[in-house]
Image (cartoon, grey):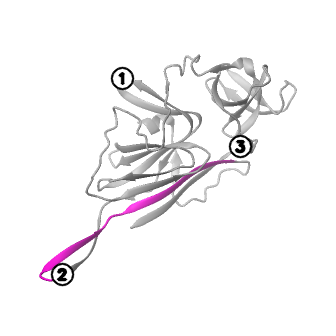
Amino acid sequence: MKNILLFSFCLIALLSSNKVYSQDSYVVNTPTLNVRTEPNTKAEIVGKLASGDVVSVINSDNPDWWKISFYGTEGFVSAKYLITIEASEQYKDWEKENSNTGDNPECENITPRYDKDLDNQLLIHVGTNADVVVKLMDTYGECIRIAYIKAGDDYSINNIPEGIYYLKIAYGKDFRKFTKEGQCIVKFMRDAVYEKGSEKLDYYKVKKPDTREGDYIVSHWTLPSFELSLNIEFTSMGINDSRDFHSKKISETDFNR
């Protein structure tokens, strides 16, 4: 038995572009930084950044004004107010994780659980706009499985023990990890969005009618499985809430709890 869920998000963006650039992460190092449509102080302001915001630098040909992207908004900022992740006091201890699809972040506070006798799955399709980290949570709020999935990939979490679960999902770019007091904290540095699924995934076996085979009564069971599509899109049309799998936005702290 397979249940198909759609989990798709759209965020507001002031500007959009179809161009693809090599992107690097930089941190805003001033209390407020204006984002402008053109590389000069007289250009229209399309957004404001705060100290500690992490942006994607998509063009640094102009040494004074760099083109950046922040949650889909593109514009120009004064380059002197951006510093590297490594130069930032806030993020300098965060280790970059070069993760591939199927990798499990090595976190001491997560103990994966499996049931090899159950051939079930959670099949996840990820859109092309962001990488994701999926946490499968039990009803006690404990994470039993965690998986990193790169943008555009599919991945299946298999051998899930019987139980009721929900999902925590992080979207973003530039995945990093920080360990504090034995707890592993993971974070997307750029364009991070954290969600908690409000629907339950019921992985209890479903009893089917027994059948008689000769002198024996044979029991039959169905193993539930779920198929999930995850995507996040930037659009000037606003947030699209027409999705079958419902969720609510949560904080980075809630995701790592």
Question: Does the residue at mark 3 contact the one at mark 2 (Cβ under 8 Å)?
Answer: no
Q: Residues within 10 Å of mark 2 (few under 14, many from 20)?
A: few
Whole-percent x, y for residue 183 in the image: 37, 29
> Which circle, 3 or 2, is nearer the viewer?
2
Tag 1, which secondary structure?
Answer: loop
Check if residue 205 falls in the magenta segment: no
Marks 3 and 1 close (CB-CB < 8 Å)? no
Q: Residue at (56%, 19%) from the top-left corner?
A: 86
Instruction: Estimate the spatial distance between the alpha carbons at disc 3 and disc 1, rounded to whole Å.
Output: 37 Å
**Part of the protein shown in magenta:** 213-234
Q: Amino acid at mark 2?
A: Glu
- Judge by depth and name the residue closer to the eye, 119 or 111: 119
Q: Pointer 2: what residue?
A: 213
Residue 201's x, y, as percent? 39, 57
Q: Quadrant of the N terminus?
A: bottom left
Element at badge 2? Answer: strand
Above-or-below relation of 146 to 242: above
User: Earlier along the polypeptide chain: callout 3 or callout 1?
Assistant: 3
Q: Which residue is mark 1?
A: 181
Query: Please, what is the three-letter code of the amino acid marked with disc 1?
Result: Glu
Picture coordinates of residue 7 (x, y %)? 54, 55
User: Hey, which residue is sitting farthest right in the picture?
Assistant: 42
Label 1 crowd (10 A; few <14 / some 14-19 / many >=20): few
| Left or right: residue 216 compared with residue 53 | left
| In magenta segment, residue 225 | yes
Circle 3: residue type: Ala
Q: Name the quadrant containing residue 256.
A: top left
Q: Residue furthest left?
A: 215
| Front residue of this view, candidates 184 and 141 | 184
